[in-house]
Amino acid sequence: MAEFITSTGTSVFYEERGQGTPLVLVHGSLCDYRYWRWQIEALSASHRVIVPSLDGFWPHLELSRFSILQQTESLAELIAHRVGAEQPYHLLGHSRGAQVALALAQHQASAPPLASLTLADPAFATPTAPATSGFILEAAQRLEREGSEAALCYFIDSVNGAGTWQKMVSWFKQMVTDNAVTLAAQAKEHIEPLDVAAFGQHLACPLLLIAGQRSPERYHEHIALLKAQLPDAYQVTIAKAAHGMNLANPKAFNQSMLRFLAAVDHGRARPARRIDAATA
């Protein structure tokens, strides 16, 4: 694990492995760089994989800086530091990490260019539904009332199905326990709704949308919103998996990513296009 100090003095911890076009993996809620343990080895065989812990997550639990904006800014600095100003890179964000990836993709003027963007079960606010949904608020309340075990059981079962928490392996339980305190900070966040049309105007690279077959409906709805606006986006559903699809079915997830990345790297992948451009 390496440490990078941002311009504001924040420590960003990350792991880096492999050679080739850089690929940045961005974790979601209650996680950190350890979340990608089944992807790092597989994807680093063909790419230089950079796996950070976002601002406020373990091992640097600084909750006063816990926000999508701060996490995006710190990640942008890390990418500029490790990738450089001109080198194209691939970006993959899962769940809350997809919100950070979306924010980063919309502010490319001062960042390295995106070679591709992948959003796995993206979580974001819409005009009719906040990003901080009821289950996050309930999990934060349970954390305060009953402690981390009850809160984490409720949260994990809410996104992956009843009984999932009890079946999880020890390393995963340790990771989310280390990040349990972030629930309170996330429950207090105000996140502006995503302007899907405006996002489409900024995106000029191939886009892959990944869903878990058994993921909660809200994530499928978000993918449908993006696909409706960007009809040339690629779409994959990971069978026999819910929200944590990269852990539940890592073979299918990794193969989908490797196929997409290879197509992009060899110039065979089409850029995502807005619906008005596609029909013009």
Image (cartoon, rainbow, N blue to C red):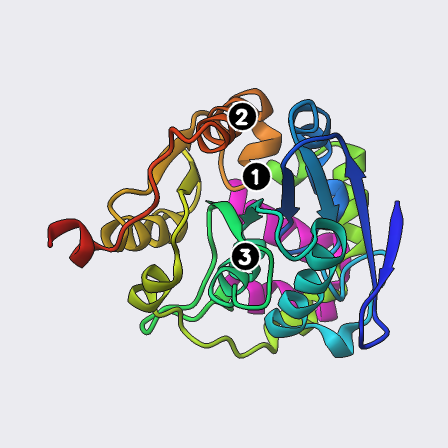
Helix, strand or loop at mark 3: helix
Is 266 left, or right, of 72 in this rendering? left
Marks 2 and 3, Cα distance to the nearest angstrom?
A: 19 Å
Please name the residue shown 11% across and 51% down the image. 279
Q: Which label's residue is closer to the chain start, 3 or 1?
A: 3
Amino acid type indicated by mark 2: Leu
Snapshot quadrant of residue 16: top right
Residue type marked 3: Ala
Residue 164 drawn above or below residue 5 = above
The answer to which of 225 and 176 lies nearer the viewer is 225
Q: Name the residue under label 3.
A: 101
Q: Identify the residue shown where x is 43% and y is 39%.
A: 210
Numbered range of the magenta stretch: 135-163
Q: Disc 3, disc 1: CB below 8 Å? A: no
Q: Mark 2 points at which residue?
A: 258
Q: Where is residue 46 in the image (x, y as percent from the top left)?
A: 65, 25
Main SS, magenta region, reads helix
Residue 180 drawn above or below residue 242 = below
Is 146 covered by the magenta stretch? yes
